[in-house]
Amino acid sequence: MSSGISAAYSSRAAEYTSLFGSISSTHTDDRALVQDWAGSLDGKIIDAGCGPGQWTHFLHSLGLDAEGVDLVPEFIATGRKRYPDVRFTQGSLEQLPTPDQSLAGILAWYSVIHTPPGDIDEVLGEFARCLMPGGGILLGFFEGDAVEEFPHAVAPAYFWPLEEMSVRLQNAGLIVVSTHFRADPGVRPHAAIVARQAKP
Ligand SMILES: C[S@@+](CC[C@H](N)C(=O)[O-])C[C@H]1O[C@@H](n2cnc3c(N)ncnc32)[C@H](O)[C@@H]1O
């Protein structure tokens, strides 16, 4: 499945970058949420499924230790070229290139949208493995009344109810801190969840 996603994004990486690859194309509320969330963290943050790296650079520009990770080589090359001071590494959500409990934060902004529902627990479990005690995750995704596939422009993707995604995060051992929802005209409903690893 991941190889299909990688091929689909590889062939459209330049198009994706020009349409969505700049921080100015993101919603002001999302920038505020990411900034607020990241400001509460102390240590390294991985932007998991970073695409062309605009959020990784945003975190870096806030003075944070941020690294972008993505399956797609074209995105990694784009990120390195556009933001030479920022680290980008090819890797997968299922096996992040980082030791257990090594991260203060994981930003997963629209990167699990293509993960088949049967695989989501594996990915959230991987995020939980990487977070240090007290570490935080911020997940952004398309919200829907049911877990349901839809034909996203690049590759099949899934709507998730906020409640269901919250339960999945809890099942991975994480504590849900806050949930966010937005329904703007003409675009798919958006949701975000802030969760954290328990402290000892
Ligand atoms: C909708 S894009 C979001 C990109 C970026 N986070 C943003 O907000 O623009 C989804 C991204 O997740 C990446 N992705 C999807 N599945 C992945 C996986 N299993 N491992 C690593 N990256 C993955 C894709 O390559 C793509 O860059």
Image (tube, rainbow, N blue to C red):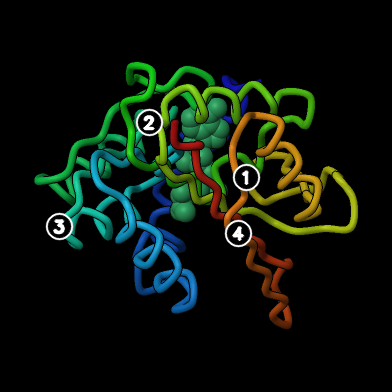
> Nearer the N terminus, badge 1 or badge 4?
1
* Secondary structure found at label 2: strand
Q: Position of residue 64 (x, y in %)?
A: 20, 52
- The label on residue 63 is 3
Q: Residues within 10 Å of mark 1 (few under 14, many from 20)?
A: some
- The label on residue 154 is 1
Above or below residue 165? Residue 162 is below
Q: Nearer the viewer, mark 3 or mark 2?
A: 2
* Secondary structure found at label 1: loop
Q: Residues within 10 Å of mark 3 (few under 14, many from 20)?
A: few
Q: Residue at horizontal 86%, vertical 45%?
A: 148
Left or right: residue 102 versus residue 6 is left
> Nearer the N terminus, badge 1 or badge 3?
3
Q: Nearer the viewer, mark 1 or mark 4?
A: 4
- Disc 1 residue: CB within 8 Å of ligand 1: yes
Q: Which residue is mark 4?
A: 192
Q: Identity of the amino acid at label 2?
A: Met
* Secondary structure found at label 4: strand
Q: Quadrant where the N terminus lies? A: top right
Q: Identity of the amino acid at label 4?
A: Ala
Q: Identity of the amino acid at label 3?
A: Gly
